[in-house]
């Protein structure tokens, strides 16, 4: 019997690439997304596209029910849905920050919670949470986004201990810069009138940050890592993916904070920017 994977945020980018890869390797795939009618994925007897908004409990329950009705079981969940709120923290409204956490953290938690009874019942399952190297390494203007990815890292690390007795494994995939529409479609920019004191910082940093869209790895590279995490059978928690993720995470471990911050400041903000 083919295994089944449920993927959130599968309309484009990493989620779509993962859906295609799992399907090509013989899996049943529930490629979930908020607006299935906008997807170019073609449903088959092994590929369905249930509507799922990670911020709505009813939507989560409905997508899982649809998947179980079609395939009878779910073996792996890939929590991929997310976006980035960027800009000076002072310019971010409380509502924007709450929405950032509602999608990137609470949505991921709610999808996981909804599937755990099924995984416990079948005494098997894999939870793959797509975090980011931004869950360990911080850049300017991404403070709310980094906060969510740090939360995903800590949540996943702790959850792995709790689920191990039920033969449920937790994996964290940490993409580096990825060449997707993340920097256009999946990004919200915070701006508030009267905060022009940050304009020089934003003008210096944003163009360099957005270069990642042109120089990053294609989403298929991260999809391959997600597939490996789902199939390698290893008791491994973290999987760097794409771009120069492994190198950047190694720098994070080796360099003292003062030196690492100096390198990031000079490469992204510049020496003359206040």
Image (spheres, helix red, strand yellow):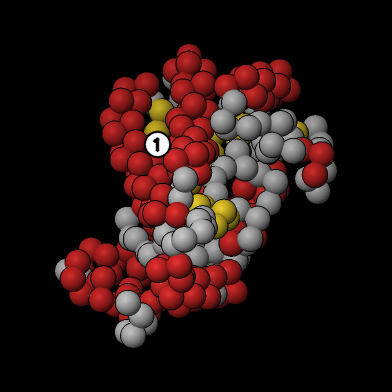
Which quadrant: the N terminus? top right
108 versus 24 height, above or below: above
Which quadrant: the C terminus? bottom left
Q: Let me know if residue 81 appears in the view.
A: yes
Percent position of residue 31, x then y: 68, 38
Give the residue displayed 80% in from the left and 44% down from the top: 38
Percent position of residue 35, x then y: 74, 38
The reply, left or right, for residue 33 in relation to residue 203 is: right
Percent position of residue 172, x then y: 41, 45
Give the residue displayed 68% in from the left and 38% down from the top: 33
Give the residue displayed 20% in from the left and 74% down from the top: 259
Residues 72 and 255: in front is: 255
140 versus 155 height, above or below: below
Q: Residues within 10 Å of mark 1 (few under 14, many from 20)?
A: many
Q: Which residue has dot 1 on it?
A: 170
Secondary element at tag 1 = strand
Count of numbered circles in the view: 1
Instruction: Spot the residue most to the front.
Output: 194
Residues 59 and 84: in front is: 84
Residues 142 and 9: in front is: 142
Q: Residue 123: name its quadrant.
A: top left
Q: Let me know if residue 86 appears in the view.
A: no
Q: Residue 138: name its quadrant.
A: bottom left
Percent position of residue 98, x then y: 46, 37
Give the residue displayed 46% in from the left and 23% down from the top: 113
The reply, left or right, for residue 234 in relation to residue 255 is: right
Q: Residue 60: name its quadrant.
A: top right
């Amino acid at each position: 019997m083919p295994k089944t994977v449920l993927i959130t945020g599968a309309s484009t980018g990493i989620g779509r690439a993962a859906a295609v890869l799992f399907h090509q390797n013989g899996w049943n795939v529930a490629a979930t997304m908020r607006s299935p009618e906008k997807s170019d994925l073609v449903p088959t007897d092994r590929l369905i596209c249930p509507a799922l908004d990670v911020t709505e409990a009813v939507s989560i329950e409905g997508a899982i029910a649809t998947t179980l009705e079609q395939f009878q079981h779910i073996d792996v969940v890939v929590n991929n849905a997310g976006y980035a709120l960027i800009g000076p923290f002072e310019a971010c409204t409380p509502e924007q920050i709450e929405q950032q956490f509602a999608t990137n953290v609470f949505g991921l938690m709610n999808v996981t919670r909804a599937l755990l009874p099924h995984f416990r019942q079948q005494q098997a399952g894999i939870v793959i949470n797509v975090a980011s190297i931004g869950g360990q390494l911080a850049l300017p203007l991404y403070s709310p986004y980094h906060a969510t990815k740090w939360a995903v890292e800590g949540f996943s690390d702790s959850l792995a201990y709790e689920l191990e007795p039920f033969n449920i494994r937790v994996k964290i995939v940490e993409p580096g810069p990825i060449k997707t529409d993340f920097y256009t479609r999946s990004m919200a920019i915070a701006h508030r009138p009267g905060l022009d004191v940050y304009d020089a910082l934003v003008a210096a940093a944003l163009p360099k940050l957005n270069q990642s869209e042109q120089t990053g790895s294609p989403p298929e590279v991260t999809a391959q890592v997600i597939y490996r995490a789902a199939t390698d059978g290893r008791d491994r928690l973290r999987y760097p993916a794409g771009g120069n993720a492994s190198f950047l995470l190694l720098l994070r471990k080796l360099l003292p904070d003062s030196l690492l911050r100096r390198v990031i400041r000079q490469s992204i903000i510049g020496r003359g920017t206040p």
